Amino acid sequence: MKITFLGTGTSQGVPVIACDCHVCTSADPRDTRLRSSVLIEWNGSTVVIDCGPDFRYQMLRAGVKKLDAIVFTHEHKDHIAGLDDVRAFNFKHDREMDVFAAPRVQEAVIREFAYVFASIKYPGIPKINLIEIGNKSFNVHGMEFIPIEVMHYKLPVFGFRIGDFTYITDMKTIKDEEKEKIRGTKVLVLNALQRESHVSHLTLDEAVALAVEIGAEQTYFTHISHRLGKHADVETELPSGVDLAYDNMVINM
């Protein structure tokens, strides 16, 4: 399995356009973070988890030529706003794009991209095949996805386990029975927004505590606000086996 971090950042915090902090002006490319998304390639299939506003550029930057499906964690704009850009893959592969989402997320997608689902189809619009998921395992082009329900403040959000890889973003709390689904995973990805307390995201300390509790061979943090600090500085504070992810980072399992 090959995993590419398309983006490890977030819309949370001071807008970059109005910011001159030491992170936003850093020369370290690891401090340049687009909205969080991950690409999974396994046995000839290619799947993206979430496609935010940076989706088109992320696909071009990573040189992605083939995309079989998109799986959504939840419906917030920083996770679904790039869906229109699947049209390039529609054209290339001459088929609809399979999009896996919970019913509530599907409703948001239909609302936000109403022209895609209108009775009169405008030439060239994205072609999307919505597939409903719930809190039970499902197959995505040969990959088994095991949903892990977490809470993003009061909003249920899905993380996913695929083999020995687990990806969770936009989490604040998790029930014990959902946590059991993570145990034994080799590579764990968690959100770690910032140091200060946040109503809907894990802080750095909370993410470290959960990573230590789960005890994966390797844990990476994503969905990182610039408020967390520079990549090189934060790395010095993390325990062994825990690191910050960065855009375009590739891991092979």
Image (cartoon, rainbow, N blue to C red):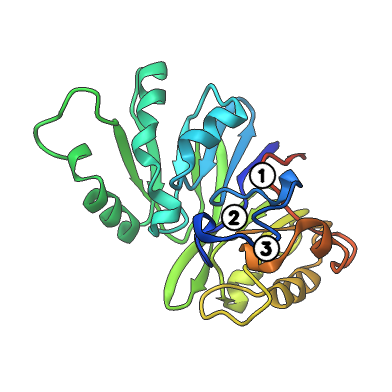
Q: In this view, does 59 lie to the left or right of 230?
A: left
Mark 3–mark 1 Cα distance, whole angstroms, equals 24 Å
- Look at the picture and state if 144 lies above or below 230: above
Whether residue 181 is visible here, answered yes or no, is: no
Q: Are marks 2 and 3 in contact (CB under 8 Å)?
A: no
Numbered disc 2: secondary structure: loop
Q: Which of marks 3 and 1 is nearer the N terminus?
A: 3
Depth check, mark 3 against mark 1: the one in front is 1
Mark 2–mark 3 Cα distance, whole angstroms, equals 23 Å
The residue drawn where x is 80% and y is 64% is: 234
Q: Mark 2 points at which residue?
A: 9
The disc labelled 2 sits on which kind of residue?
A: Gly
Q: Name the residue under label 3.
A: 182
Q: Earlier in the sequence, mark 2 or mark 3?
A: 2
Residue 210 % position (x, y): 72, 73
Q: Mark 1 points at which residue?
A: 247
Mark 1–mark 2 Cα distance, whole angstroms, equals 8 Å
Residue 113 % position (x, y): 25, 45
Q: Is residue 127 left or right of residue 176?
A: left
Q: Are marks 1 and 2 in contact (CB under 8 Å)?
A: yes
Q: Which of 173 and 161 is in front in this view?
A: 173
Q: Which quadrant: the N terminus?
A: top right
Numbered disc 1: secondary structure: loop
Furthest residue in direction left, as rendered:
120
Whether residue 225 is visible here, answered yes or no, is: yes
Residue 229 % position (x, y): 72, 65
The residue drawn where x is 36% and y is 24% is: 90
- Look at the picture and state if 60 lies above or below 12: above
The disc labelled 1 sits on which kind of residue?
A: Asp
Q: Which quadrant: the C terminus?
A: top right
Q: In the picture, residue 124 is in which quadrant?
A: top left
Q: How crowded is mark 3: few (under 14 residues within 10 Å), some or many (20 or more)?
A: many
